[in-house]
Image: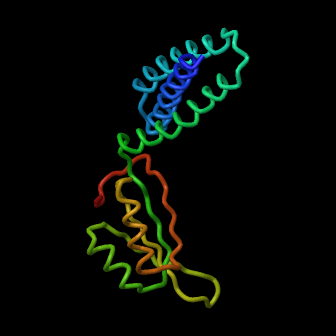
């Protein structure tokens, strides 16, 4: 029974990791790789489900192994996706007008930046929106840099589907 639980756990870990990675690759616009990954994902899933359902054991460990493989597979699939899928992120920052400390720090760090003055209907303080396009691996350090120079900045990070021209670090 222990061997059965171990096989179920690792099979689920594999098929869910494949499913997570396939989904991420599909969202990024690839077509062939997700189809190949989907084939193997379903093949592994069918084999493990068949083995789990055909067992004559009424032990709680079989569904626990199945569920644990799913949970850990999700984590591993996400980790693999973050490591191997390189993508672009659009970072929008709303900060006080003429926040030269923040703007200079962003430029000094080597990021390209576009600045747009924001207009409000009321007499509230003036704001600016900073547009920065970065690789997904740079988002964490850019957010840290922004927070260091403006703890009250409003920051939005979005995946970019397509980027043409501009300056990317």
- The count of marks equals 0
Q: For this rendering, which residue is in front, 14 or 24?
A: 14
Q: For this rendering, which residue is in front, 152 or 115?
A: 152
Residue 118 percent location from the top left of the image: 52, 78
Image quadrant containing the N terminus: top right
Q: Is residue 11 above or below residue 91?
A: above
Residue 128 percent location from the top left of the image: 47, 78
Q: Is residue 93 above or below residue 169?
A: below
Q: For this rendering, which residue is in front, 117 or 125?
A: 125
Residue 78 percent location from the top left of the image: 47, 41
Q: Is residue 4 above or below residue 141?
A: above
Task: Give the residue displayed 41% in from the left and 32% down from the top.
Answer: 30
Q: Is residue 167 left or right of residue 99?
A: left
Image quadrant containing the C terminus: bottom left
Q: Is residue 50 left or right of residue 168?
A: right
Task: Give the residue displayed 32% in from the left and 77% down from the top.
Answer: 105
Q: For this rendering, which residue is in front, 33 or 44?
A: 44
The outermost residue toward the right is 58
Task: Give the residue displayed 46% in from the left and 38% down from the top.
Answer: 76
Instruction: Find residue 166 and report its image quarter.
Output: bottom left
The outermost residue toward the front is 2
Q: What colour scheme governs how the chains and residues are painted in the rendered image of this protein?
A: rainbow
Task: Give the residue displayed 49% in from the left and 38% down from the top.
Answer: 27
Q: Is residue 46 above or below residue 29?
A: above
Residue 74 percent location from the top left of the image: 53, 37
């Amino acid at each position: 029974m222990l061997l059965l639980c171990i096989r179920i756990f690792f099979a689920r870990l594999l098929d869910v990791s494949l499913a997570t990675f396939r989904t991420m690759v599909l969202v990024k616009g690839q077509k062939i790789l997700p189809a190949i990954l989907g084939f193997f994902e379903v093949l592994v899933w069918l084999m493990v489900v068949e083995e789990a359902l055909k067992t004559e054991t009424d032990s709680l460990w079989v569904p626990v192994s199945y569920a644990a493989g799913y949970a850990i597979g999700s984590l591993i699939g996400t980790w693999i996706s973050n490591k191997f899928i390189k993508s672009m992120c659009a970072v929008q920052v709303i900060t006080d007008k003429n926040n030269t400390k923040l703007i200079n720090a962003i430029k000094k760090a080597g990021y390209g930046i576009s600045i747009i003055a924001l207009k409000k209907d009321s007499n509230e303080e003036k704001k600016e929106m900073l547009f920065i396009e970065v690789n997904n691996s740079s988002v964490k350090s850019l957010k840290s840099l922004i927070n260091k120079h403006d703890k009250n900045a409003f920051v939005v990070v979005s995946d970019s589907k397509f980027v043409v021209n501009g300056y990317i670090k």
